[in-house]
Amino acid sequence: MTTALSPADFPDSPLSQVLRQPFLLGLFLPIQDGGWSMSTLPRSTDWSFDYNLALTRQAEDLGFDLVFGLAQWLRKNGHGGRMKYREQSLDSFITTAALASATERILLISTLHVLYGPWHPLHLAKFGATLDHISGGRWGINMVTGHIRTEAEMFGQVAQEHDLRYQMADEFVGIAKRLWSDDENLTLEGRFWKLKDAFVSPKPKFGRPVLVNATSSEAGMAYAARNSDIVFITSPAGAEIEAALGALPAHIARLREIAAGQGRTVRTLINPTVVCRPTAAEAKAYHDDIIAHADLEAVDGFIGTFANSDAKAWRNHQREQRILGGNLHLIGSPEQIVEQMLRLKRAGVDGVQLTFYDFKEDLHFFGEHVLPLMKQAGLRL
């Protein structure tokens, strides 16, 4: 048996290339209807593949490091409201796979519920190795255990207890790592999965694909410490920037402490929704217009869905904060946005995974007005 190295252990891997940046920059693709904002203010944001392909290419041209896609399983009408918020959505795994041959440099992270339905570690190991080669080592998985009861029910399953899900995920990913590294057939009888004479080829180009997870719990942090390269964190104090900055240092320090206990280093990403205009007054007016067009039925439906969840990350996010969405709000002029990012970095955050209200137009504005200031501030090379 050999050890599955992280792609960060290879200096020429795509992950190592982006980790040279002082502050990571990602885009959270709106592959679901309504993106992150439960507002009916007119915008271009669209869940279609063509729209998200154009966004990904736009982000790659701007020098972004990675793109994510959200995974969800919702019933008819989505979260409800006039918008039928998120009823329409593309699958993250298939979407990012399709983006692999349409891009050249940017990392592509699929979100996948590994505990739903018939998934087996052998599936992930083979599919992941294939995507690794198609993308030249740029593909990764954001592993989620599935924390919403109604999602598990769609698969005819009963939602498992929180910490047990992470034990299952740990075994699942541990087996996949063995399959990515072992040079001989693997026979194994685990607690949750079994294999007999299983083998995967070709082996990933840089040890294994990039591994990511989102967590705020002790069990999730322990999983991340053992397995993940990047950890997607949420503000424990809600989406308002000052409250978040007060809570994040201790939260991140705890994650790093657990990772250090495993002899590992992990990077943290947080997901701000950016509302930026040339002046602070214009940004506030844009934000207020978004909020004034809130689809409150959709907001309450969204909150109701998460009431069927044991996730710990969003408990202090207020109802009004859900309208704009994201787990942090950065609002202001380009100079103010960059200053807020500098403060996030000083709080221990290693990068941001951005969302916008009007993705195409707002990303263009960000690239033209904010990104140059990030470079001047030393956040980007």
Image: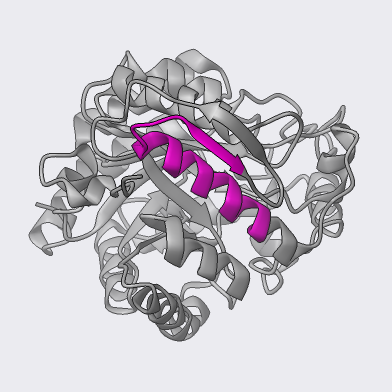
Measured along the vertical axis of the image, is residue 292 above or below residue 96?
below
Where residue 318 sits: x, y (%)? 70, 69
Residue 241 against residue 64 in the figure, above or below: below
Tally of numbered discs: 0
User: Which of the 4 quarters of the picture holds residue 23?
Assistant: bottom left
User: Is residue 229 visible in this depiction of the protein?
Assistant: yes
Q: Position of residue 250 (x, y in %)?
A: 45, 86
Residue 209 lies in quadrant: top left
Query: What is the span of residues highlighted in magenta in the rendered image?
Result: 166-188
Q: 237 left or right of 109?
A: right
Magenta portion: prevailing SS class:
helix
| Residue located 67% across and 66% down the image | 314
Q: Is residue 225 above or below residue 48?
A: below
Residue 164: % across, % down: 73, 61
**In magenta segment, residue 374:** no
- Location of the N terminus by quadrant is top left
Q: Pick the residue in front: 39 or 193.
A: 193
- Whether the magenta-drawn stretch holds residue 182 is answered as yes
The quarter of the picture where residue 351 lies is bottom left
- 135 left or right of 194 in image: left
Q: Which of the pair 63/141 is nearer the observer?
A: 141
| Camera sees residue 45 | no
Residue at coordinates 80% horizontally, 32% vertically from top-left? 84
Tell me, what colour scheme is on the image? one colour
| Left or right of residue 318: residue 269 | left
Quick check: 76 left or right of 239? Answer: right
Q: At 32% from the left edge and 13% from the top edge, which residue is drawn?
A: 101
Query: What is the x, y in percent for residue 287?
Result: 53, 54
